[in-house]
Amino acid sequence: MSTLSEKESRAPTTRLGPAATRGLNTNYRGGLEGDRAREPDQKLPELCGVGDPTATFSSDSSHLSSRGSIIKWFWDSAEEGYRTYHMDEYDEDKNPNGIINLGTSENKLCFDLLSRRLSQSDMLQVKPSLLQYPDWRGHLFLREEVARFLSVYCRSPAPLKPENVVVLNGCASLFSALATVLCEVGEAFLIPAPYYGAITQHVYLYGNVRLVCVYLDSEVTGLDTHPFQLTVEKLEMALQGANSEGVKVKGLILINPQNPLGDIYSPGELWEYLEFAKRHELHVVVDEVYMLSVFEESVGYRSVLSLERLPDPQRTHVMWATSKDFGMSGLRFGTLYTENRDVATAVASLCRYHGLSGLVQYQMAQLLQDRDWIDQVYLPENHARLKAAHSYVSRELRALGIPFLSRGAGFFIWADLRKYLPEATFEGELLLWRRFLDNKVLLSFGKAFECKEPGWFRLVFSDKAHRLHLGMQRVRQVLEGTSQVAEDPPSCQTQEPRGQHR
Amino acid sequence: MSTLSEKESRAPTTRLGPAATRGLNTNYRGGLEGDRAREPDQKLPELCGVGDPTATFSSDSSHLSSRGSIIKWFWDSAEEGYRTYHMDEYDEDKNPNGIINLGTSENKLCFDLLSRRLSQSDMLQVKPSLLQYPDWRGHLFLREEVARFLSVYCRSPAPLKPENVVVLNGCASLFSALATVLCEVGEAFLIPAPYYGAITQHVYLYGNVRLVCVYLDSEVTGLDTHPFQLTVEKLEMALQGANSEGVKVKGLILINPQNPLGDIYSPGELWEYLEFAKRHELHVVVDEVYMLSVFEESVGYRSVLSLERLPDPQRTHVMWATSKDFGMSGLRFGTLYTENRDVATAVASLCRYHGLSGLVQYQMAQLLQDRDWIDQVYLPENHARLKAAHSYVSRELRALGIPFLSRGAGFFIWADLRKYLPEATFEGELLLWRRFLDNKVLLSFGKAFECKEPGWFRLVFSDKAHRLHLGMQRVRQVLEGTSQVAEDPPSCQTQEPRGQHR
């Protein structure tokens, strides 16, 4: 029951009513960089949206609470893609005509290296202390190791401290815990969109916290800008929009390297966003789960923990995990780093519900301290393989004349398939997605990431060559109209599937 | 950082205002077993209490949400006992004058057997599928194994089904998830008290669900009754009390074998409680984590899953874990069994936040399927060791003339130290507890379990002989007044510590 069972969030129905843009021309826009005067009655583009994760929900169970029904609905409505894929999963020998999964963001390139390392005898240590109730922050030996590890790989100016570390069973849990301890029910985080859509659920299911999208678009508006560029102006406007809708924003979520864009924020940009947050007394949650999956040295990635100082260290909270950078999403290991002791303690208090096995904690400490293996074996080989896979998919897309974004980080390419849409709407996007699925290749469509322009797709390239080649061949068939599948969607499909894939 | 780091719930301040008993003489009491006519103005004993987990809370952090501050407070207020114990933990060689922990309910008798089994080569299997995103209900191979295991050890009349199984990282998480999907915010579960106090937090921290205590007392009122006996009459009265306070009760929590009493419900009793719940359309959450820790064959324990049929199968949800029965509270493996697919699905949807490593899932499947080891090695030896330790502590208590309950199940003895209290109040109970701690032995006091009679203590006996003997010697010193510690509490102690121990 592998990859696709991570049921990711469907893009919540987003709305930007007049309330959200009301007043944007007045208070905040005056002194902002790049601002140009607009007439008050001029129609504003959709710059933000307050998500309502339950907009299309209807209850179906008398045995559940109303929130229980919503929680179940999140599972059920992800089932279509999940069922379709798992009923017909590709297997080179047993099911060569099965579905190739270029949707789930997992790194399948290094299982050989990982299996070998994790099978070594040092990994199976069964001490009594590992079988007893742990410190819910994580065993001290592991927090010490995490602090050392992050000090080195985030290149922190000073050694990071174990007491600022909390370990738990993955970043999904960490989003849930942070949302709960930082926000009241109904409050919100800002998040630049497109973004990894599952965060919608992570902050909502337990925490009842919403996301306010800071919509980015593909238009390039100046010499120094690039498509989907995040600016402080956009942050300010989204914040203002939320305020005018009566939604209290408590923080900002930054994903760096970004998912699904693959973008990397420069230290200068990062600093601006952090300063924006400080000005408004917003927490910043920095998700750096792809930190070591930067396979192009030249892009010069910088962790937020590498900054000489932080504008507001008490409100800056960093998350990292082994799911992506060590290709082990099934291992369930994530970590928080924050200088705010209250936040660390409150999250630790919730870690009773997010605990990981003492045996796994021991394994992770062994892994993270094995710098020889990491530096000499794993990272060089992993990066080389990511780069090769990325180059292959890039070449294929170029050959097809498809524009795409890709910055040399992450496991995916953000591709512009707008010209292939039967109509320039999200319904058209869904039709194209179904055509791919009917031709046995699973991609992620842009709406699952809250992209506001229909027609963008995320293609995951971090897979073995034989699957990747076959997957890209099937993509090409659909785009060139040479696939054997019907152009019309099957009539039985009624419900929009949720975006499935991290 | 071992045993005590499980920060358990302090007994929430309970109140039984007039509202809670109002009307008890009228509607429900008429036809109930054992009921005797009372004058309407006669003072009723405290029969139920609606818990307010935050009664003594005051906020202390401007960076946290109000609920975040409460969540942090639950951690902080557990710190006294934790800090005291961990700063001075007993070690035979390094710290022989350190504190002996007879407070945390862990089985420390079988680490040798467990270490040997878990270190065998079959336990370290690193397949790619284990490193990828799992089915959040748990890998199918594990759910199949759990269904087979529970069918055998719960002696179910028909084979249990993998599709009714959800696995996750422990029963704390399961309480949290069930509370959230079954109750709205502010709704409640009935629970017979004394009970394992941490459940207060488990249903409250994320779920905002409260507990309504069904108070049991030590008085024996008839030939067929025993101390702290749960009756349907008491359940009815507590439900009525909650209703009259405007608290909506959605379910009943039963712990069987019971913690801290060690009680076992007979099939007849169990049936009555389940019928009570059905009458009122209440869910029943049956916590059977001590199911295989029944070391006296004669007590005839029966799992709820062994009943020929259930009164209300769609509202009956069973939890089990390896924490107690396999002495591995640090391994974080628990499971739900329910025939209600909606509940299973809703809990599964929350399991993204309660997931356990694929590697651990594999290990647990290996363990649970090794019936030879379980039946020939582990269970007989574990039961023999539990029995021996239990006999020793029983003898000691008898020699001291201390009344106690003990039914041949669980890791603890519920002892009546009322005659040793400096005053017959919870303050007196706390003073005695501190006297034990000052004499370097940690016990759990009754208030941590919501016991309504001051003076009851839970003594955990599932520890190695040398620690147990020393611990009991220190208990004896305090009770006989021969300890070297001052009789007066140190003046620096101001805050009541939370009950720490499962």
Image (cartoon, coloured by chain):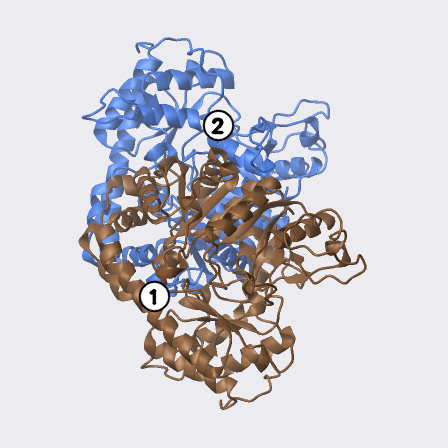
Chain colours: A brown, B blue
Q: Real-space Cα distance between discs 1 and 2?
A: 42 Å
**B317 or B96, which lies in front?**
B96
Is A171 above or below relative to B103? below
Q: Residue at x 44, y 43 (%)?
A: A351
**A62 or B224, which lies in front?**
A62
What residue is pinned by disc 2? B77
Crowdedness of circle 2 by 10 Å Cα count: few (<14), some, many (20+)?
many
Quarter that holds the C terminus of chain B: top left
Q: Secondary structure at mark 2?
A: loop
- Give amino acid for label 2: Ser
Is A246 above or below relative to B139? above
Question: Where does the image place residue B479, in percent across and percent down from the top left?
Answer: 35, 14
In-image side of B419 versus A368 (left or right): right
Q: Residue at x 20, y 25 (%)?
A: B94
In-image side of A378 versus B267 (left or right): left
Q: Chain of mark 1?
A: B
What residue is pinned by disc 1? B129
Q: Are marks 1 and 2 in contact (CB under 8 Å)?
A: no
Question: Where does the image place residue B154, in percent across and percent down from the top left?
Answer: 38, 53
Quarter that holds the N terminus of chain B: top left
In-image side of B385 versus A318 (left or right): left
Is A250 above or below relative to A398? above
Q: Is residue B198 visible?
A: yes
Residue B500, quarter of picture: top left
Closer to the N terminus: mark 1 or mark 2? 2
Q: Chain of mark 2?
A: B
Most extreme residue toward the front, as rendered? A223
**A143 or A241, which lies in front?**
A241
Q: Are marks 1 and 2 on the same chain?
A: yes
Q: Residue at x 55, y 48 (%)?
A: A273
Q: Is residue B304 visible?
A: no
